[in-house]
Amino acid sequence: MTIAWNSFTPYAALLGGALIGLAAALLMLFSGRIAGISGIVGGLFRPTDGQRGWRIAFMMGLVISPLAYQLFAALPESSVDASWPVLVIAGLLVGFGTRYGSGCTSGHGVCGLSRLSPRSLAATLLFMAAGFATVYVLRHLLGAA
């Protein structure tokens, strides 16, 4: 994946961040739930009474949002420079880490940090450190692209 820094749009990024924060706050305010994607998706696989509808609606919003954005502006180009086996292994590792860490970056990084949760601070620091270390090892020690 490459980032075109000359195409960076700070106002769109700021608006996007504000909308994520607003959505997380509204979910907490109206349902008492944390907007952690892994927990929301995980709840779809172990349904309880009255829980499936809002979870499906939330996930549909994640899918529909870029489509709605396209009505007003072009989506940025993106590319993934990895093979399917690497993507599958990476996805499994992320899934394992999410379960092991009791949450994902959205639950800990967005919602947990805003609630001043020490556990979320530790989890977010570890997420970031693991990402930095992975990139360093792959790109600088192993020479992978």
Image (tube, grey):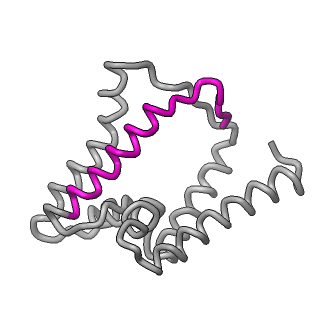
Q: Is 17 a magenta residue?
A: yes
> Is 131 situated left or right of 32 in this image?
right
Up-down relation of residue 59 to residue 2 (above or below): below
- Which residues lie in the magenta part? 1-28
The front one of 47 and 118 is 118
The front one of 132 and 60 is 132
> Is 32 situated left or right of 102 in this image?
left
Q: Is 72 a magenta residue?
A: no
| Figure quadrant of the N terminus | top right
Looking at the image, which residue is at 69% across and 37% down?
Answer: 81
Q: Main secondary structure of the magenta part?
A: helix
Looking at the image, which residue is at 42% across and 59% down?
Answer: 106
Residue 132 lies, in percent from the top left, at: 71, 59
Up-down relation of residue 51 to residue 62 (above or below): below
- Image quarter of residue 49: bottom left
| Figure quadrant of the C terminus | top right
Count the labels in the image.
Answer: 0
Up-down relation of residue 130 to residue 78 (above or below): below
Residue 8 lies, in percent from the top left, at: 57, 29
Extreme left residue here?
50
Looking at the image, which residue is at 25% across and 58% down?
Answer: 25
> Is 38 situated left or right of 78 in this image?
left
The front one of 102 and 126 is 126
Residue 40 lies, in percent from the top left, at: 30, 62
Residue 32 lies, in percent from the top left, at: 19, 69
The front one of 118 and 78 is 118
Extreme bottom residue here?
118
Looking at the image, which residue is at 50% across and 73% down?
Answer: 121
